[in-house]
Amino acid sequence: MRHRMKRNKLNRYGTHRVSLMRNLAKEVIDHGTIMTTTVKAKVGKEYIEKLITKAVRAYKVKNENKAESVALRRQIFTELGDRKLVNKLVDEIAPKFATRNGGYTRVIKVGARRGDGAELSVLQLVEE
């Protein structure tokens, strides 16, 4: 049986897939938008939304529970590996999404790539 096996492997082995998601997340956090294939964008969306959810929680509990906020920042750091991006995510991006219950990113299809015909999409943070 294939219980709990739902995952798009993107034709990559595990560590390559993890590094791909980390790089996508870093670029979206740094630039706010990125153009990639539709399949990568959909998988990356799930990954980035989980990070933003942790960042919003860290932002909300910053004043009440300092230890929990630091723990959440450390969890985000283990995924991104860049302290500047963690600070940008928690201090600049999370306040914008503090009142949202999800749906922090969107995928917009833009057409096919000229060379190989792969379907391209734009993965971006939602601005209100």
Image (cartoon, grey):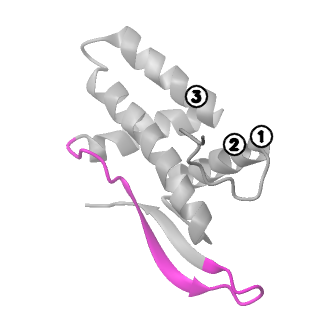
Q: Residue at (23%, 46%) from the top-left corner?
A: 100
Between the C-alphas of marks 3 and 1, the distance is: 17 Å
Residue 113 forms part of the magenta stretch: yes
Q: Please tell me whether residue 124 is drawn above or below residue 20 in the rendered image.
A: below
**Are the residues at dot 2 and dot 3 in contact (C-beta closer than 8 Å)?**
no
Amino acid type, residue under disc 2 in the picture: Val
**Are the residues at dot 3 and dot 1 in contact (C-beta closer than 8 Å)?**
no
**Residue 96 image point, x, y percent:** 29, 47
**Are the residues at dot 2 and dot 1 in contact (C-beta closer than 8 Å)?**
yes
| Residue that lies at the very extreme toward the left in this rendered image | 99
Residue 26 in view, yes or no = yes
Amino acid type, residue under disc 1 in the picture: Thr
Residue 25 forms part of the magenta stretch: no
Mark 1 falls on what kind of element? helix
Amino acid type, residue under disc 3 in the picture: Phe
Sequence-wise, the earlier of marks 2 and 3 is 2
Sequence-wise, the earlier of marks 3 and 1 is 1
**Residue 8 image point, x, y percent:** 62, 54
Disc 2 crowd, CA 10 A, few/some/many (<14, 14-19, 20+): some
Quarter of the figure with the N terminus? top right
Disc 1 crowd, CA 10 A, few/some/many (<14, 14-19, 20+): few
Question: Magenta segment range?
Answer: 99-119
Mark number, residue 18 = 2
Mark number, residue 15 = 1
**In the picture, residue 70 is in which quadrant?**
top left
Q: Which residue does the numbered mark 3 point to in the structure image?
A: 77
Residue 35 in view, yes or no = no
Disc 3 crowd, CA 10 A, few/some/many (<14, 14-19, 20+): some
Between the C-alphas of marks 2 and 1, the distance is: 5 Å
* Disc nearest the viewer among 3 and 1: 1
